[in-house]
Image: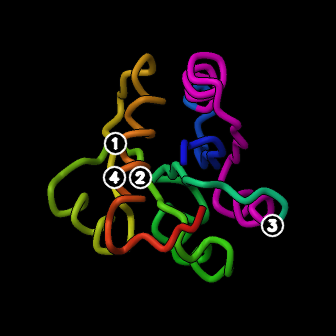
Amino acid sequence: MQLDKILHVEDDESIRVIVKMALVDLSGLTLVSCDGGQDALTKVDTFTPELILLDAMMPGMDGLQTLIELRKKPHCQHTPIVFMTARIQQAEKQQYLDAGAVAVIEKPFDAMSLGDRLETIYQAYLASPDSDVTE
């Protein structure tokens, strides 16, 4: 099963544009962009992503709060979540992983390889015993 549908949650519009170019234009993926946690909670009701790319630091509802709220939605309970953040101290990275993220990508990221990197993370998730994804 190949990765196709991604929900991207990021408050910085310039990063949303770069991610859209990287994932839609370069990798041919289906992407729904959200400008914050509340927007993501609304859009995920009509769009079921295969992977969620989530900014850690956002005004209002931060990435960890957004992850907790997304997990309350039945169709998002087993969706792999990847944090993307400039705050990459080991303790913070561990906090994201402990909260249920499958990976953490550091900003700035390589836009040219972002799609491939997410595909690799997704395939590793599918192969893991914790994965509850059905084809």
- Comparing 74 with 131, the one in front is 131
- Classified by dominant secondary structure, the portion drawn in magenta counts as helix
Q: CA distance from mark 4 to mark 2?
A: 16 Å
Q: CA distance from mark 3 to mark 4?
A: 26 Å
- For the residues labelled 3 and 4, say whether their Cβ atoms are less than 8 Å apart: no
Q: CA distance from mark 1 to mark 3?
A: 26 Å
Amino acid type, label 3:
Asp
Which residue position is annotated with label 2?
83
As helix, strand or loop, the secondary structure at mark 3 comes to loop
Horizontal arrangement in the rendering, residue 77 relative to residue 49 (left or right): left
Which residue position is annotated with label 1?
105
* Nearer the camera: disc 3 or disc 4: 4
x%, y% of residue 49?
66, 55
Q: Is residue 21 magenta?
A: yes
- For the residues labelled 4 and 1, say whether their Cβ atoms are less than 8 Å apart: no
First in sequence, mark 2 or 3: give its number: 3
Residue 71 lies in what quarter of the image? bottom right
Q: How many marks?
A: 4
The quarter of the rendered structure image containing the C terminus is bottom right
As helix, strand or loop, the secondary structure at mark 1 comes to strand
Amino acid type, label 2:
Phe
Q: Is residue 91 magenta?
A: no
The residue lying at 62 percent from left, 71 percent from top is 76
First in sequence, mark 4 or 2: give its number: 2
Which residue position is annotated with label 4?
124
Residue 45 is marked as 3
Amino acid type, label 1:
Ile
First in sequence, mark 1 or 3: give its number: 3
